[in-house]
Image (cartoon, rainbow, N blue to C red):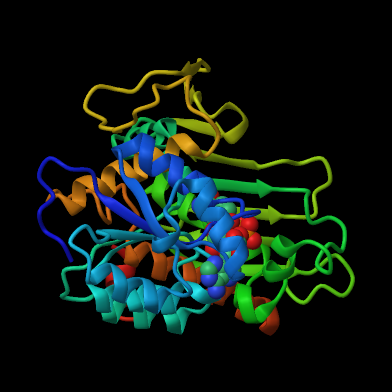
Amino acid sequence: MTTDLQGRPLRMAMVGGGQGSFIGPVHKMGASIGAGIELVAGVFNGDRERSLASARNFGVSADRCYADAAEMFAAEAAREDGIDMVAIATPNHLHLPIALAAIEAGVHIMSDKPATATLAEALRLRDALAGGDVLYALTYSYSAYPMIREARARVAAGAIGTVRKVVVTYHQGWMSKPLEAGDPRAAWRTDPGKSGVGGASADIGVHAFHLAEFVSGQRVTELVADARGLVPGRALDDDCNVLLRFAEGQAGVLVVSQVAFGEGNGISIKIYGDAGALHWTFEQADALIHARADGSVETVKAMSPGILVRTPLPIGMGVGLIAPFAVLYRDFDAAIRGDTTRIGTVLPGIEEGVRGMCFIERVAQNNAAGNGWSVLETPGETAKEVAA
Ligand SMILES: NC(=O)c1ccc[n+]([C@@H]2O[C@H](COP(=O)([O-])OP(=O)(O)OC[C@H]3O[C@@H](n4cnc5c(N)ncnc54)[C@H](O)[C@@H]3O)[C@@H](O)[C@H]2O)c1
């Protein structure tokens, strides 16, 4: 790993994210806009020709477009201008092997979610990162919207009193038909060997789960789940309805579906306290609704003093997912340069990754067992720590 970071932009590789992918260009743009990070190498597609074509599109030279991740880490380690970090933007089952190879090579990791395909893999990754120098962050993109950070700060400051209930929903419609045979994006998401134990619960439910804990500042300790494939023949859930209980007894509801015709990317969170409520929705991401016990309703569009969101795209001028990715990459760039205070606080890290995998696995287990509430406890933590 190179250490001469003074006065130069970080150099990044990407695995996955090539031609036809959804999230790859978002990583490249977010890294560039957020922190001037340069995409210089990669393995962009499983297919070599498409990977080379992707490298051309990304402006990466052909000699740094590699056949696989192992070749890439070895070749980049031998260069004076080798990579500092890697973005992982492949289907879920490849997250762990790429992350382990990056750790071995001493390369920092910005991984897309979910952390891995299974909880066991996430725990393995946590062990591999423990005590080492490699930094790891996870792109739970919704946590990086300025108004979500504002909501989290307001809850923490007691602006809605004691939290009573959290309602988080995430609705998409694009998988309402049996697309899996013809659409590569749907194919891996409905394949347990590539997505993991969860379908919609892993793909978008994990975002909703993270948002519920991130904004409320509370840990989910129990859940009951009904997660099913509503499109006939689908191997994994495409619709997932979960009751949550939080550490201090607060109620919660998490409703997620990818078979909701007419829905684009409908993620929202409502959080109710004994002195008010907050409401944020992706469709109006630059506004936060704050209702108070006196009946007044404020539309918040500016950050409160002291809440640091290092966004290069001012509120009101953000673009889709690129703006929050820019915030995440800016925070990670600062961490690599020595300020690691934001990892695990506002910048999700491996612990948040493990939490997400606990959620996905517990939903699948509870749904299969169908016998009431299941405890949601992060392995390696005591029950007391979970409740803290
Ligand atoms: N943070 C977010 O908001 C967000 C949004 C969408 C997707 N994601 C996550 O990003 C990841 C990718 O999702 P997507 O929607 O871009 O998927 P996608 O199917 O659109 O793209 C996957 C890419 O990975 C490439 N790939 C597959 N096998 C590969 C291999 N062996 N080596 C190199 N490249 C390979 C494919 O060729 C393709 O370019 C998933 O883990 C997903 O959960 C996150």
Residue 324, quarter of picture:
top left
Depth check: 228 or 254 in front?
A: 228
Q: Is residue 123 above or below residue 353?
A: below
- Foreground pick, 266 / 218: 266
Q: Is residue 98 left or right of residue 320?
A: left
Residue 209 drawn above or below residue 195: above
Instruction: Give how far across and how far down residue 240 sits, in percent.
Output: 69, 62
Please give left or right for residue 246 compared with residue 268 in the image. Answer: left
Figure quadrant of the N terminus: bottom left
| Residue at image coords 79%, 56% | 175
| Identity of the residue drawn at 61% across and 81% down | 365
Which quarter of the rendered image does ligand 1 occupy? bottom right
The location of residue 184, given as percent across then percent down, is: 73, 64
Q: Quadrant of residue 266?
A: top right
- Using the rendered image of the protein, determine whether residue 244 is visible from the camera's viewpoint: no
Name the spot of residue 205 as percent of width and height, x first: 59, 58
Image: 58 above or below 307: below
